[in-house]
Image (cartoon, grey):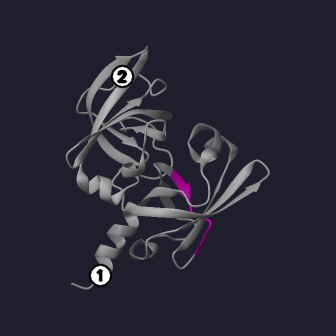
Amino acid sequence: MTSVGTVKTITEQGEMMRLAVSMEAAGAPPEPGASIALGGICLTVTGIDTHEGSRLVSFDIGPETLAATTAGSWSAGTRVNIERALKLGDELGGHLVSGHVDGVAQITERRDEGETVAFAFTAPEALSRFIAVKGSVALDGTSLTVNAVEGAVFSCHLIPHTLAVTTWGERRVGDSVNLEVDQLARYVERMVAPD
């Protein structure tokens, strides 16, 4: 996760949605066609504009993405985590995150523990088998370590830095978050599954 942006405008276009996001802190302006993850969702840049001194980057979101992620619930003012695409030679920290969201998880508990926060989530039943203690998940595009798992419920503990530089400090019980399970878990399941 490299920065946080704010949704400025949303325009419905039939089954699709076009949104413009302020990306002031996201580094050099992206090129049209570039892939950028917003809230963990890999999207394509469709336009770049300036409005009232802000750099606005536009994205078109199709019906499948709207149905399978939290993007359909976004509105003007929604803050989203931004992750630019990894370039050859960039440092690889955390785990590989593709921006291909597998489903939506719900925050079921938030425990503020001094400077850190422990969150509990309920994952869709079909995805819970891919979540393991000490394994990785991406939630709203943030690579996190799983601390505990019980059935479809899992928990992650966030440090002050993560809470400060992402949207996680704003998250509350009942919020929905985009969930991407670890890619390696999916490949292992495919390899051991009977033909």
- Residue 161: x and y in percent read 65, 41
**Gap in angstroms between the C-alphas marked 1 and 2:** 44 Å
Residue 152 versus residue 85 in the image, above or below: below
Give the residue pinned by disc 2: 29
Say if residue 122 shows up in the picture: yes
- Badge 1 crowding class, 10 Å Cα cut-off, few under 14, some 14 to 19, many 20 or more, is few
Would you say residue 100 sits in the magenta stretch?
no
**Label drawn at residue 149:** none
Q: Residue at 43% across / 39% down in the picture?
A: 83
- Residue 108: x and y in percent read 60, 66
Would you say residue 144 sits in the magenta stretch?
yes
Provide the secondary structure element on which disc 1 rests: loop
Q: Residue at 24% across / 53% down in the picture?
A: 63
| Residue closer to the observer: 22 or 185 | 22
Give the residue pinned by disc 1: 193
Disc 2 marks a residue whose amino acid type is Pro
- Residue 138: x and y in percent read 47, 55
Disc 1 marks a residue whose amino acid type is Ala
Q: Which residue lies furthest to the right in this view?
A: 114
Say if residue 97 shows up in the picture: no
Quadrant housing residue 37: top left
The dominant secondary structure in magenta is strand
Left or right, 10 with reference to 76:
left
What are the residue bounds of the magenta stretch?
143-149
Residue 169 versus residue 147 in the image, above or below: above
Q: Which residue lies furthest to the bottom in this view?
A: 194
Q: Check the picture and name the quadrant holding the C terminus.
A: bottom left
Q: Residue at 43% across / 28% down in the picture?
A: 23
Q: Residue at 34% across / 28% down in the picture?
A: 57
- Badge 2 crowding class, 10 Å Cα cut-off, few under 14, some 14 to 19, many 20 or more, is few
Provide the secondary structure element on which disc 2 rests: loop
